[in-house]
């Protein structure tokens, strides 16, 4: 009695599952350190620009001229922390 080899048949097709990114972690992290929430969501260049602006504003705030830059970068970082998560979700076909 001879046994015939069976062709390979995968048990199930593995479909990669993309989990949506929630908005709040990017906002919370950018509240603490502006720009890092954007970096975490895949916008590394934009997050770096926000972080550098915030550092420049912090250094300039010693002379009071940097306060608007400091607060502007802080607010921009929090807003972009949420928007970058939305952009990431949209790029991966997830509506949020």
Image: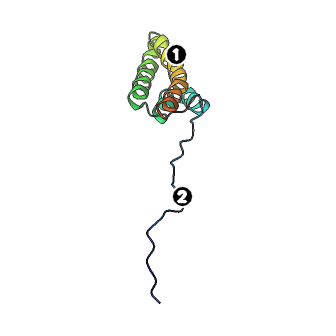
Q: Position of residue 39 (x, y in %)?
A: 45, 33
- Under tag 2, what secondary structure? loop
Compared with residue 58, is residue 10 higher up or lower down, i.e. above or below? below
Q: Position of residue 61 (x, y in %)?
A: 47, 15
Q: Which residue is mark 1?
A: 71
Q: Position of residue 86 (x, y in %)?
A: 53, 27
Q: Position of residue 21 (x, y in %)?
A: 56, 35
Mark carried by residue 37: none
Compared with residue 20, is residue 16 higher up or lower down, i.e. above or below? below
Label 2 CA crowd tier, 10 Å (few <14, some 14–19, many 20+) = few
Q: Is residue 76 left or right of residue 45?
A: right
**Quadrant in the picture for residue 57:** top left
Q: Which residue is mark 2?
A: 12
Q: Earlier in the sequence, mark 2 or mark 1?
A: 2
Q: How many marks?
A: 2
What separation in Å lies between label 2 and label 1 (alpha carbons)?
Answer: 52 Å
């Amino acid at each position: 009695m001879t046994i015939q080899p069976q062709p390979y048949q995968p048990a199930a097709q593995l479909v990669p599952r993309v989990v949506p990114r929630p908005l709040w972690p990017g906002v919370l992290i950018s509240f603490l350190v502006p720009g890092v929430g954007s970096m975490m969501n895949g916008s590394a260049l934009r997050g770096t620009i926000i972080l550098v602006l915030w550092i420049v504003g912090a250094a300039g705030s010693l002379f009071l001229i940097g306060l608007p830059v400091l607060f502007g970068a802080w607010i921009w970082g929090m807003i972009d922390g949420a928007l970058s998560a939305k952009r990431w979700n949209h790029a991966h076909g997830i509506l949020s």
